[in-house]
């Protein structure tokens, strides 16, 4: 006796790289100072579809430099790891883990301060209604003085 055949999963993988260019960014610590960000956004993902459900997981990584109008600059990095599952009776679960950091330097390149932010969140939706939201952690860290 043989097991019944099941459909092979449909798997899609891709990476999309996009330049970052943004002007007129306000400086959170220096009123009147604005900046220009130049960098790269990389979005990598995989989807898996089976008769039992759909799974999407991906990563977005941003790296950039902001040059401020007062001559100082910031090096920034941001990473999001996320997953989406659609399984059974109209239930979907989204999980996102986010971390970002800003290293700030004087016009002469002397380190001034670092800001970091971390959060992990879970959202469950059943039949179109949000039935659960959970934040596992969410906090800022400041090293040095703004």
Image: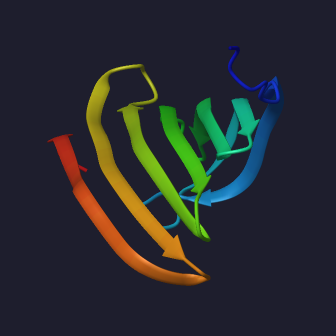
Establish if 108 lies above or below 136. Answer: above
Nearer to us in this view, 114 or 108: 114
The residue lying toward the viewer, choosing from 27 and 2, is: 2
Q: Is residue 128 visible?
A: yes
Q: Residue furthest top?
A: 1
Residue lying furthest front? 1
Q: Position of residue 21 (x, y in %)?
A: 78, 41
- Colour scheme of the picture: rainbow
The number of numbered badges drawn on the structure is 0
Identified at 22% across, 55% down, the residue is 136
Of 145 and 101, nearer the camera is 101
Measuring from the top left, give residue 82's x and y in whole percent. 53, 43
> Would you identify the image quadrant in which residue 31 lies?
bottom left
**Is 124 positioned to the left or the right of 8 in the image?**
left
Q: Percent position (x, y) of residue 18?
A: 83, 33
Q: Is residue 100 left or right of residue 50?
A: left
* Residue closest to the far bottom: 129
- Residue at the image position 30 percent from the left and 42 percent from the top: 116
> Relative to residue 144, is residue 137 depicted above or below?
below
Q: Quadrant of residue 51?
A: top right
Q: Residue at x 39, y 31 (%)?
A: 106
For residue 28, side relative to residue 37 (left or right): left
Q: Is residue 42 visible?
A: no
Q: Residue at x 68, y 14 (%)?
A: 1
The image shows residue 44 at horizontal and vertical percentages of: 70, 27
Q: Quadrant of residue 109?
A: top left
Q: Is residue 110 left or right of residue 15?
A: left
Residue 29 higher or lower than 18, as above or below? below
């Amino acid at each position: 006796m043989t097991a019944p055949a099941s459909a092979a999963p449909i798997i899609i993988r891709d990476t999309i790289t996009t330049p970052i260019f943004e002007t007129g960014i306000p400086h959170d610590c220096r009123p009147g100072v604005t900046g220009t960000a130049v960098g790269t956004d990389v979005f990598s993902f995989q989807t898996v579809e089976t008769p039992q459900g759909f799974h999407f997981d991906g990563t977005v990584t941003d790296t950039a430099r902001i040059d401020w109008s007062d001559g100082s600059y910031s090096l920034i990095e941001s990473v999001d790891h996320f997953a989406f599952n659609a399984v059974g009776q109209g239930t979907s679960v989204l999980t996102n883990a986010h971390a970002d950091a800003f290293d700030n330097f004087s016009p002469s390149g002397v380190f001034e301060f670092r800001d970091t932010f971390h959060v992990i969140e879970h959202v469950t939706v059943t039949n179109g209604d949000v039935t659960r939201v959970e934040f596992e952690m969410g906090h800022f860290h400041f090293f040095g003085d703004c």
